[in-house]
Amino acid sequence: METMRSTWTDERMDDLARRIDSGFERVHAEFRALRTELHSDIGGLRGELHSDIGGLRGEVHSEMGALRGEMNARFERVDARFDSMQRTMFGMMATIVVGFLVTNL
């Protein structure tokens, strides 16, 4: 250990410190460039996602409107069938009552 210390002069230590500082400056510059690139890429992705989600919302909205229309039409048909059944049942009941009255009078 003592022999290594004797070969490390102040100039060599200063040179090593400058090289280390220079290396860290390059690393910081690369990080700044990477951060800028990531920021722009993320901004682009946000824009794409926003437009895609807007398109999906429109599609879902139109599909839901079509589904509502279809369901309403089917419910109207079911209501019409219930109305028809009620009329038939009322007619049958009236026939039974009239028949009962005619036979018992």
Image (spheres, grey):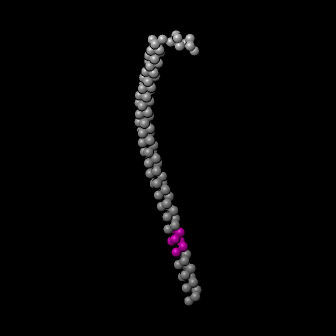
Q: Nearer the viewer, residue 40 or 31?
A: 31
Q: Nearer the viewer, residue 102 or 51?
A: 51
Which residue appears at 49% of the width and 64% of the height?
79
Over which residues does the magenta segment extend?
84-90
| Residue 34 within the magenta-colored segment of the rendering | no
| Up-down relation of residue 46 to residue 87 (above or below) | above
Residue 27, position as x, y percentages in the image: 46, 22
Residue 100, position as x, y percentages in the image: 57, 84
In the picture provided, is 42 more to the left or to the right than 105?
A: left
Q: Nearer the viewer, residue 39 or 19?
A: 19
Residue 41, position as x, y percentages in the image: 43, 30
Which residue appears at 46% of the width and 50% of the height?
64
Q: Residue 96 falls in which quadrant of the image? A: bottom right
Residue 85, position as x, y percentages in the image: 53, 69
Which residue appears at 50% of the width and 58% of the height?
74
Residue 90 seen in render = yes
Residue 26 seen in render = no
Question: Where is the N terminus found, in terms of image quarters?
Answer: top right
Q: Residue 35 falls in which quadrant of the image? A: top left
| Up-down relation of residue 33 to residue 87 (above or below) | above
Question: Where is the C terminus found, in terms of image quarters?
Answer: bottom right
Q: Nearer the viewer, residue 95 or 16?
A: 16
Which residue appears at 42% of the width and 31% of the height?
39
